[in-house]
Image: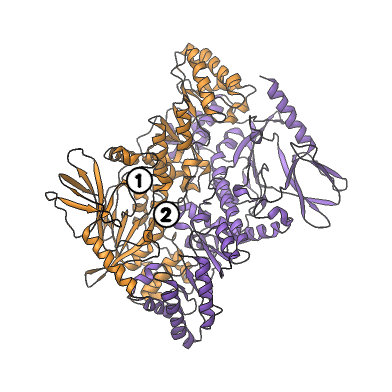
Chain colours: A orange, B purple
Amino acid sequence: MNTNKIFDIKDERNLTMLTDFYELTMGNGYFSKNLQNKIAYFDMYFRRVPDGGGYCIMAGVEQLVEYLQSLKFTNDDIEYLESKNIFSKDFLEYLRNFKFECDVWAVPEGTPVFPNEPLVTVRGPIVQAQFVETMILLTINHQTLIATKANRICRAAKGRTVMEFGSRRAQGYDGAIYGARASIIGGCDSTACTIADQKFNIPAIGTMAHSWVQLFDTEYEAFKSWAEVYPDNCLLLVDTYNVLKSGIPNAIKVFDEILKPLGKRPTGIRIDSGDITYLTTKCRQMLDEAGYPDCKIVVSNSLDEHIIRDVLAQGAQIDSFGVGERLITAKSEPVFGGVYKLVAVENDNEIIPKIKISENNEKITNPGFKRTVRLFDNNSQKAIADLILLNDEEIDVNKPLTIFHPSDTWKNKTITNFYYEDLAVKIFDKGNLIYECPTVLEAKDRAKNELNRFWSEILRFENPHTYYIDLSHKLWSLKHTLLHAANNAY
Amino acid sequence: MNTNKIFDIKDERNLTMLTDFYELTMGNGYFSKNLQNKIAYFDMYFRRVPDGGGYCIMAGVEQLVEYLQSLKFTNDDIEYLESKNIFSKDFLEYLRNFKFECDVWAVPEGTPVFPNEPLVTVRGPIVQAQFVETMILLTINHQTLIATKANRICRAAKGRTVMEFGSRRAQGYDGAIYGARASIIGGCDSTACTIADQKFNIPAIGTMAHSWVQLFDTEYEAFKSWAEVYPDNCLLLVDTYNVLKSGIPNAIKVFDEILKPLGKRPTGIRIDSGDITYLTTKCRQMLDEAGYPDCKIVVSNSLDEHIIRDVLAQGAQIDSFGVGERLITAKSEPVFGGVYKLVAVENDNEIIPKIKISENNEKITNPGFKRTVRLFDNNSQKAIADLILLNDEEIDVNKPLTIFHPSDTWKNKTITNFYYEDLAVKIFDKGNLIYECPTVLEAKDRAKNELNRFWSEILRFENPHTYYIDLSHKLWSLKHTLLHAANNAY
């Protein structure tokens, strides 16, 4: 049913002004102090996986690319900023001729990612590298949140179909559109969001609402009309009046009277209310006895990973889940706490690492220009650990490598017979895009394939094994040197 | 600091295809059954106030108007739909020439609203009235959710300044932009979201991030530079290293050395981490002793209405709150459960009410074409109750009016000496816009003024008095007649 033409991949809005006002006051400040061209390094990363899960699924890079490519201050934007009477002429003139010049690295969409790993790194003139903070966070935070939630829900469904149904309860239009996109990357099979199909070539599906059934004088008449219009895709919503006394009997009658003479089989029935376990068990029995064991049972009503796991454990007979509001808003934990922190500056081409200290250990940044590698065991082909290094560090796979826990440093492990892959790829070079974004379905495949490279303990639904995210010895030493220096300053 | 020119009020995207796919399969079904021009009535309403609150603040009407005005299927849209191979030529031809023809009523933005009251009512050819379901729900659900949450947070702040700071953690770009808009309607004083200011003429503000402080060799140098650039708006972020040992002493030094000689006063200091009550109390003392009792204290760190209420009760010294992720996502309850239900159809110009029944009383719809009035007492000028009537019912304010609880019908009350106001206004007549949307600041004023017309018990922060939402006797009787008929059918 899906089309191959992608109709409108670009977001035609100019979102340059979707930025926290302080990015502009700081930008003006850099100009006033003649610091605007100082080269700075910023990392975007998160500190904690939502919902107690073991990992997140990276998403949103394509939208970040679109944003960075279309950065442009219009005359209206400049006029607006002028009207604030706080920005210098030099700064406004710079914005008027703004040309993005940064280097950007990002982890590809669909990659499983872990706390403290740089997901996006930006290097460039501080006035630019600072300015893009708000949109990098907004884009990656949102889509990674939803892709991660979708992945949890799909795992709970254990291979059954999961459809994203949440547009009407999303937080804004992009919440629906890019939320649908991220849901597919996380593992959903389809969406109800039509424009997401049109834009991203992800399958949109849908049948009927209660209003279709209400419109006719009887439920039977409503079902009969539907079967006549859609004999090849006859999925009936059976809970407008009473599922077992009315909905299923009427559905079976219509399957018998309309589809059977045409030699067609029904697609399914959908239940959107009531006791899912009880109703689906009874429905399965009634449909089987009527000769429709191939008629799928679809359920949809405030589902999430916990309810799906529970009803399946109770023996509910379900082929397909429609998941709405609790997926599209990540209801159980609707905030993804990604941050964007200054980690280094350059002085005469020398990289000077910077640290942000805090009373709270978790909030202390990892300083310097870094890279992250994922280490794999040559025998099992499974991931062993991720290692964050300074960018100029090399790994020699022919030598044993000792990795250690960044705070409980006595926890260490020496690995041999391994290989590694860099997590991030460079996507912009001096402002020029040098990366081709994968399609949404390719990113979805990547998520599936990359997760297969982890031991199942790491992927566990609750209380997963903690995957090792270690710092290289050089990075660890640098961090501790800077921490001691900062602490001794007061 | 705010500009008066509104630069770009329109959302330039064509969001016609942002619709659940089933709106299209049903539309095609209506066509196949020659039902497309049957006149239908749909109500959009919600069933429960989030967070245990007493009321919601209506928001999102302006965006709904923009959407309905710009409904248009492009050639690409038609080509996409054709590629699905399920839509009839007639239906696609209809969409190609689509012209919105419905009547629409909506409750103005800023109005306090209650469960089960129609917030939006659409009357028109069912193929159209059905089609707009997804976007009506998406728009009103999102903005009403955020305006309601903002109103709770502002109430907790008891008149202190509340700034919306959440863009980076919003769910998508619209989540940030329209979330900022709705936050202002709910009562926030300003936003950090620049584009929201530019579009809606709501004040955007912002100063510095930790990266500004990190960029300089010392905190003192960073503060000094800032004061030199912004002597008239010097607000310093004091928690990059240590608030009491470093941040405040450096701030005071800079106020003394840079601002004082210029005859300027500091704007404030901001704290973004740590124990708010302890730190603000100490900061207040230090600033007062240094001769800066007028220096405002701003705090911002995962705040919501509960934390604000707690720290104020503990004696925290705060002038201004920056509220981010917990406002922009309505974190405690991020789903607004508005629904859109068929309530009537017309047969030969006669209105035939429709009902959707359910095992769950709350989910049974109020049938028929209705209006809602708010009843006010002539003496106190306070609201007494809201009454939902059939549209053709009149109220005679010169006669006593008996209202009663829709399920506990023995709870009744006879009122005299009252007046009433209709909640909804007609905004589209046969597809033509006949309504001028108020500005965001006018909607904000409306929320403030209308809330003053309620008794304080209704507005209580927790465990509010339940405001009466009653049905007229005629509507109540109709509902029960239809319920009995439906129940007897099985």
Instruction: Tell me which residue sits at (28%, 64%) in the image.
Output: A479
Q: Is residue B401 left or right of residue B251?
A: right
Instruction: Tell me which residue sits at (44%, 61%) in the image.
Output: A17
Give the quarter of the figure containing the C terminus of chain A. bottom left
The type of residue carrying mark 1 is Tyr
Q: How many marks?
A: 2
Residue A138's image quarter? bottom left
Residue A203 picture location, percent across and down? 40, 34
Residue B285 picture location, percent across and down? 53, 77
Residue A339's image quarter? bottom left
Let me know if residue A228 appears in the view. no
Secondary structure, mark 2, is: loop
- In depth, the one of A203 and B364 nearer the eye is B364
State the residue lying farthest toward the front: A410
Q: Crowding at label 2, few (<14), some or many (≥20) Cα neighbours within 10 Å?
A: some
Residue B368 picture location, percent across and down? 70, 34
Residue B131 picture location, percent across and down? 55, 37
Let me know if residue B42 appears in the view. yes
Chain at numbered mark 2: A
Q: Is residue B25 above or below residue B386?
A: above
Q: Is residue B408 above or below residue A135?
A: above
Q: Is residue B465 left or right of residue A166?
A: right
Image mark for residue A55:
1
State the residue lying farthest toward the top: A261
Q: Which residue is mark 2?
A: A337
Cβ–Cβ below 8 Å for labels 2 and 1? no
The type of residue carrying mark 2 is Gly
Chain at numbered mark 1: A
The span from disc 2 to disc 1 (Cα, nearest Å) is 14 Å
